[in-house]
Image (spheres, grey):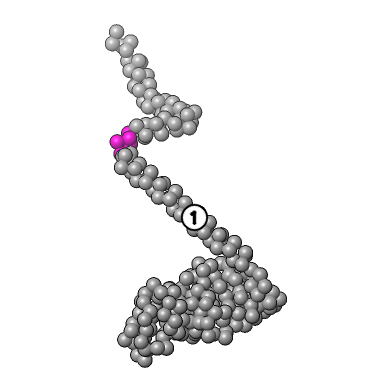
Amino acid sequence: MAASQWPAGPRWRGGRRLWPWLALLVVLALVRWSKGAGFVDAYALLSRPFWPGSAQKEWLQSAGTLEQKAQLELLRQDNARLRDLLELNRGSGDGQVAAAVISRNAAAWWQQLELGQGASAGLASGDAVIGPGGLIGRVQSVTPTTARVKLLTAPGSKVGVWVPRTRQHALLVGVGTARPQLRFIDKDIKARPGDLVSTSPASTLLPPNLPVAVIQSLNSRAVPAPKGVVQLIAAPEAVDWVQVQTR
């Protein structure tokens, strides 16, 4: 009986060597047939303890809520801007021309901008340029179809203004920042932060009593006369349509 078992021994050992390869072929065939779905499920099952917890889910929900609030705020701002544009267009008439801002100089953001209207629409050098709420500058030069505006914030810009509440005159001077300087003529001033600043009724270059700015701070000890810092009512960096008051 021992002699009859010898041939079976090598065959059995050869079969044992083939089983791993056959199993590998079967696994590969299953992977190809299932396109790896089994491995994905196994990975998901093994990695489940490491999945993000409820805290991260709450963070994502909070971020989504903040995003929705931000979108609503942007829509509100766009709505307000469009209302201002409608008011500008309604105000356009004799001596008033609505114009779009078509270009800004990135190197001179607070100095000038270009309008999509020019001499053919009646614009001329020196015309007052009004944004939603107040004066922002004057036309510096024109072509037949465009106009360049020198902003009140530009260095060297000087406009005669006054404080209607106290009836004291001053000079609004651009210094290249968002907030121009207010240089009073009188040494004894009664103005205070929060007062409105408008174009002077004595000015021959601009229409009188156009809203311009609100006083932010004052330095009553400045020499030779008191000075102040103002915030323009119409922010030049946010204006995309203007109204030009032609003369």
* Residue 233 placement (x, y as % from top left): 47, 71
- Viewer-side residue, 3 vs 39: 39
The image shows residue 34, relative to residue 103, as above or below, that is: above
Q: Residue furthest top?
A: 1
Considering the numbered disc 1 on the image, is that residue within a helix, a strand or a loop? helix
The part of the image, by quadrant, that contains residue 227 is bottom left
The image shows residue 55, relative to residue 17, as above or below, that is: below
Going 54% across and 79% down the picture, which residue do you hit?
A: 208
Type of secondary structure dominating the magenta stretch = helix
**Circle count:** 1
Q: Amino acid at mark 1?
A: Arg
Whether residue 180 is visible = no
* Residue 47 placement (x, y as % from top left): 33, 36
Going 52% across and 82% down the picture, which residue do you hit?
A: 201
- Viewer-side residue, 133 vs 140: 133
Q: Quadrant of the N terminus?
A: top left
User: Circle 1 sits on which residue?
Assistant: 76
Q: Quadrant of the C terminus?
A: bottom right
Q: Is residue 221 left or right of residue 205?
A: left
Going 34% across and 82% down the picture, which residue do you hit?
A: 219
The image shows residue 213, relative to residue 28, as above or below, that is: below
The image shows residue 126, relative to residue 63, as above or below, that is: below
The part of the image, by quadrant, that contains residue 194 is bottom left
Whether the magenta-drawn stretch holds residue 158 is answered as no
Magenta segment range?
A: 46-50
The part of the image, by quadrant, that contains residue 21 is top left
* Residue 38 placement (x, y as % from top left): 41, 30
